[in-house]
Image (spheres, rainbow, N blue to C red):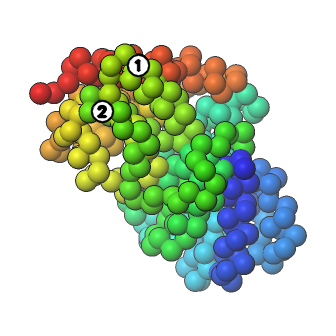
Amino acid sequence: MSTRVGFRDALLTLAEQRDDIVFVSTDSLKVVRGEPFLEKYPERVIELGIAEQNGVGVASGLAGSGLLPYICTYAGFLTMRAGEQIRTFVSYPNLKVRFVGANGGLHGGNREGVSHQFVEDVGAMRGLPNMTVLCPADGDQVYQAMLASVDVDGPVYIRIGSGREDQFFEPGTEFPLGKIRVLADNGSDVTIFGYGFLLARLMEAAEKLKAEGIGAKVVEVATIKPLDVEGISALLKETKCAVSVEDHLVTNGLGSAISEVISEGSPAYLVRLGLQDVYGESGPPEELLDKYGMGVADIVGAAKKAVEHKIV
């Protein structure tokens, strides 16, 4: 199941259970394979064309009227083109609108190019008061995150991909809303934090480190906000060093969030991997991740650097 289909199928499930679910489309039905939803619930689809700012305004009005609108389109068109509308008409009044951003990260670069490849979205949403930010790892986890977050008070942003993601978790695995998840525990030398479509790389890096006698914990942080500060702090206090890996700019993303935890009472040495104040380019996703410093070898090297500079 791709992340786009995971969103669509969860929306169908929720609509079967509740009569307040509405899909606001900004020419994005095809983006999320949404035709089955339109066929089954035509009265619950509001099509606005390529008008994301208007879409957020409509979603705000629907939420203010007691409905639960989901608006899904490309991540940057939501978080940047309609960023002011999200801030003023949804985040500020703390309304229950669900924003779903497709093509998060470098994965969209091989099909639609850099204009549809978004590496700023998590930071843009993380900075808004009241906003919950979720980054599921695969299609079924998107499905589970949709179900887990349906009753969250206030706005929610869910990052999804290009539709070509590999399955990582067993289908039906519960989404840990608001909590970190330890995926591997090979020792207490270093903690490797990550989310989204990079988890398989983190696991492979941990195995390579283990073969070299370095014990790494691999930790998924799928809820970027509200951050599981307690869980992250406990791991940092144990390993005293860490690596963050994200298919996003290192500015104001996961690495920045962990840095804040470190500065507020959990001293540790942190190496941040991600896009280092640059934009991506068109190309196959796996090659792009390698080029921009998120390859398995890069993660292994970052872990060794972190261990070398460990706070003791």
Question: Which quarter of the figure has residue 238?
Answer: top left
Give the residue type that dot 2 points to.
Gly
Residue 12 locus on image (x, y percent): 73, 69
Say left or right for 251 vs 122: left
Q: Is residue 169 visible?
A: yes
Query: For the image shown, how many numbered marks are present on the structure?
Result: 2
Give the residue type that dot 1 points to.
Ala
In which quadrant is the C terminus drawn?
top left
Q: Relative to 131, does residue 306 appear above or below in the rendering?
A: above
Say left or right for 158 vs 40: left
- Name the residue nearer the viewer: 19 or 166: 166
Q: Which residue is mark 1?
A: 211
Circle 1 residues within 10 Å: few <14, some 14–19, many ≥20 = few
Q: Relative to 22, does residue 244 appear above or below in the rendering?
A: above
Residue 39 locus on image (x, y percent): 87, 70
Q: Secondary structure at mark 1?
A: helix
For image coordinates 41% across by 39% down, the residue present is: 184
Circle 2 residues within 10 Å: few <14, some 14–19, many ≥20 = some
Residue 241 locus on image (x, y percent): 25, 30
Q: Secondary structure at mark 2?
A: loop
For image coordinates 31% across by 40% down, the residue present is: 258
- Name the residue nearer the viewer: 86 or 142: 142
Q: Which residue is mark 2?
A: 187
Residue 122 locus on image (x, y percent): 48, 45
